[in-house]
Structure formats: structure tokens, C-alpha cells
Image (cartoon, helix red, strand yellow):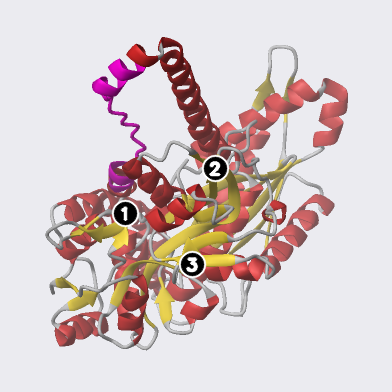
Amino acid sequence: MVFTLFSGQLERPVLAIMVVTRFLINAADMDNVCIQPNNTGFLRKYLPGFWFALALLGALAAQAQQTEVENGGAATFNEAELGYLQQKKTLRYCIDPDWMPFEGLDAQGRHIGISADYLQLFQKMLPVPLQLVPTKNWAESIDYAKSNSCDFLPLAMKTPERSRHFNFTLAYLSIPTVLVTTHDKPYLHHLADLPPQPVGVRRGYGVAELYQQLNPALHLMQYDSYDQGLLAVQQGILYGFIANMGSISFSMQQNKMQNLKIAGRLPGDSQLSFASRNDEPLLGSILQKMLLRLSVQQQQQIHQRWLSVRYEQGVDYQLVWQVILVATALGLLWLWAYLKLRRLNRALVAANAELARLSQQDPLTGLYNRQFFEQKLQDALALCQRQQLALTVAMMDLDHFKKLNDECGHLYGDTCLREFSRLCRSYFQRPQDLLVRYGGEEFVLISLGTAPAAMEKLLRAFVGVIASTEMNDGEHCRNCTISVGAYCDVPTQELDGKTLLELVDQALYQAKNQGRDQLVLIPPRG
């Protein structure tokens, strides 16, 4: 299941439903509104119909949203944002002119790359034109943004230094950071394994600041381009070059550098966002809204267009004939080495893809794992605090699971975990739902934008569904129950992820102490 909050699906339909829901709750509040007895009966009779209409409205709005963006529909901006755009008349932006495939300039000086495709979609939503402000290099682009010569940067990595000047949207592109060396260097598993030799990075990039903080003893040398840095590696001036996987692969393929290899993946992936000046917060809000309106399919098409690895090897037939005439054996040896290198490259690409999948997915249930959950909880909490959306975090635990394992065996226990995961996916399959296997028999649900009362009803019904479902593997057949501790509320600004998990965990233990097979909600604030 895809958690579409982080890919741009959750915005206007959920916000609209929240507004109408709040109106209905206030209308039904007997302490705030004086309702005649006969009117009260009418409200209680038809209120379920209102809920059904709201759910249908949300589904239709979500379906219409993607069509609207693809057809050039404008994003929904508030009055302050529209006033800001009318005052600006044009939104100016700066890019890194030499950072392909992410962004750059072609021979005619036109903006190309991933960020160019994103801005083409943004232009369809904006009532004002976008204008590229040409710069010589990335350092000049940052200086232009700081001095208000341009309004925003389409692709920037958030660092402590840059956060002093810019606001950043949610990251929409995550690229692995790797180390490139010559073939004679060993594969590195940790940053601390680097020998005390010079290592290259791109000048002015956030990766330099990041790795200097991680390892102050690291001897970093900055270069103006990837081609210069890779050439220094080939010539032995550098031990290696640190860069993101997309750019370094592009440069190696363009220059046909066959004697270099990727010698390890380093911590700190490049999390890329839109950056705007922090003294113009309305622009940051506008960029975030447009980013959230993009569908998963639209973003995947852009990424696949520019980040798909293509291996193109031309054959110099004249050289082949010369090699055959001079030494057939030498030609065969070269062919053997080439085929071996291609197999190794393919194996490395497959291993990196599998590593990325395993780092986020639980192999038994297919749900997201705890590491992915910890990454996304802070993002979800921050968005709900900023937009005043209701946040649900529910921790679910299979009751007496250890006893079940001891009596029926671990194979049956695994069957129960897989069946429970299947039921979770079928029950919580809305775009705003994220399911995680937290560890052992513990599972966590994150959901955004659903009213607390509705979410409580949904969770209590799910507890009943599990209790009435038989877990059958052909040899054993039992009914399982679950205990649930949940937080359903609009989070305060002071609430952090660690405190929230502690509250939910306490509610879960309360549910167990009260007899299990039940839901315990954290009392709402105020």
C-alpha cells in the first residue's frame, strides 16, 4: 500500500471534508446550539446520510483532482497567496546549470532535467509565469536566491546553514549517496573505513557540509564539476569522489569511464526539496501546495525519464580489426573482461534496488517496517500541526501471541501475522492510511484527515472483525484478538514524535491490563 500523503495525494478533498465535518459536529452540539426536540430527532435520523454524502464527495473530489492537474487546472490558493502572486507578477527561479540529470541547461540555454519537468506541471497551476534567472554555477544560484535576485530554487538539499536563509518543502526526491573509486580499491561499508587520503565533492553542495560534520577528520577537496572530480580519481589525485547516484552515473556514462566503480553506499541520502526565502513564507506554502497536487504517476514518469540507467556501448570496428590482426588472444581477453564488468554492473544495480526495498519493507508481511515508520512519522506530525489536520496513530498488538507460538508453533504464528496484515490492508486502504509492522506482533496505523469520532468507530469495528475471524493454516484454526492503543486528535505544536509514541504505548498497555480485546483512546486535549 502506498502512503500517498508523501507522494502528493492528500490535500484539498481531505481539508474540505474536515471543514464540513466540523460544521456538522458544531450543529449537533446541544450545549452550543438550541435545537427544538422535534429537530433533534430529525438530525439523529439523517446524520448518517450526511456522513455517507461526505465520504462520496471526498472520493469524487480525489478522482477529479488528478484529471484537473493533468488538464492544466490551477491549484487552490488562499487570498493571501493569490495576493502575493498578483504582486510578484512573475516567479523567478535559479538552478544549477551543470547538474544533470536533475537540472541543467542545453546548448540553447534552455532549462532541462527533472526540475524542468516539475516546473512545467507547476506552470499549469499558476496564474503567473515562471522565469529562469541564468547563473554561472550553483554557488551563484544560492547567492542570487539569498540576495532576492531570484525567488526560489527547484532542487536543494536542506542543511543547517541553508535553513538560516530558506524554507524547504517536503522532500520529493531521495537519491542515494555513493563513493566512486578506481577498480583496485576495496568496497567500503562505513564512512569510518575511508583511509586518510583526499576525497572529492562538488563545490557548494550540501554533501560537503554533511560529511564534514559526520567526520571532521575527513580531507575533502571541492571541484566545480563531476567530470573534474572523476578525472582526479582516475589520475590518483583523489582516493574517491562522493556524490549522488543519479549524477555520478550520468557523468560516468557520458564520459565512458570504464575504469571506475561504485565502491560503497554512504549514509545521508540526498533529500531534495524546493527552497524559498524564509522572509517570504507565502511562496513556501504555494510551492508545497503544488507539490502535493502532483500524483504518484506524474512523479514516477519524470523520475523514470531521467533516472533510468542506460548502458550504451559503441563498437569501434576498426579498432576490433586491428586488435584481431595484432593479437587475437588479446582481443578475446578484452572481450572477457568487458562481459565480466557488465555482469558485475548489473548485479550491483540489482543489489542496490533490492537493498532499497528491504530497507523499507518487512519481508514476512510485506508492510512497511519500523525504519520507514520513524522516517515518516515526523513528516506526518509536522504536516498535521501546520495544517491543523486530525492525526491518528494506533498501535495494535496480537493478544497472547507468545502463548500461541508455544502451543501451535512458529509456522502457525507466521500464518497469523500474514493473515492479520492482509486484514489490515483490506480494512485500512484509504489513500491517507499507512500500515507498519513495528516489531514482533506489534503493528502501527497512521492516518490523516479523519475526524476523531469517525476514526474511533472504525478502530472499534476493526477490533471486532479480528475477534470474529478464524486464523486457519490447514492444521490449526483459532480466533485471535487484538489490543489497541490510539491517539486521534489534532496535534498541538508542542507534541513531538517520541512523546506521541510513548502516549500510544501507554494506551496499549492499558488496553492489555483491562482484559485485552479492546481499544483504549488517549483522552483528547482540553
Per the image, is 193 magenta? no
| Rendered image quadrant of residue 362 | top right
- The residues bearing labels 3 and 1 have C-alpha atoms spaced at a distance of 18 Å
Question: Residue at 17% across / 64% down in the picture?
Answer: 123
- Mark 3 crowdedness (10 Å alpha carbons): few <14, some 14-19, many ≥20: some
Mark 2 to mark 3: distance in Å?
Answer: 19 Å
What type is the residue that disc 2 sits on? Thr
Say which amino acid is labelled 1: Met
Q: Which of marks 2 and 3 is nearer the N terminus?
A: 2
Element under label 2? Answer: strand
Residue named by callout 3: 222
Badge count: 3
**Image coords of residue 61 (percent x, y):** 26, 54
Categorize mark 1 by other alpha carbons within 10 Å: few (<14), some (14-19), many (20+): many
Q: Which residue is labeled 1 in the image?
A: 100
| Residue 96 in the image: above or below residue 248 | below
Considering the image in quadrants, where does the C terminus appear? bottom right
Judge whether 95 appears above or below 114 on screen: below
What's the amino acid at mark 3? Gln
Q: Which residue is drawn at 33% across and 85% down?
A: 280
Residue 325 horizontal/vertical position (percent):
33, 12
Q: Which residue is labeled 2 in the image?
A: 182
Residue 273 appears at what percent x and percent y?
40, 65
Q: Do the residues labelled 2 and 3 touch (CB within 8 Å)?
A: no
- Distance from label 2 to label 1 (Cα)? 22 Å
Say whether residue 276 is left or right of residue 182: left
Determine the secondary structure under disc 3.
strand
| Front residue of this view, candidates 95 and 57 | 95
Q: Can residue 158 be seen in this view?
A: yes
- Bounds of the magenta span? 302-323
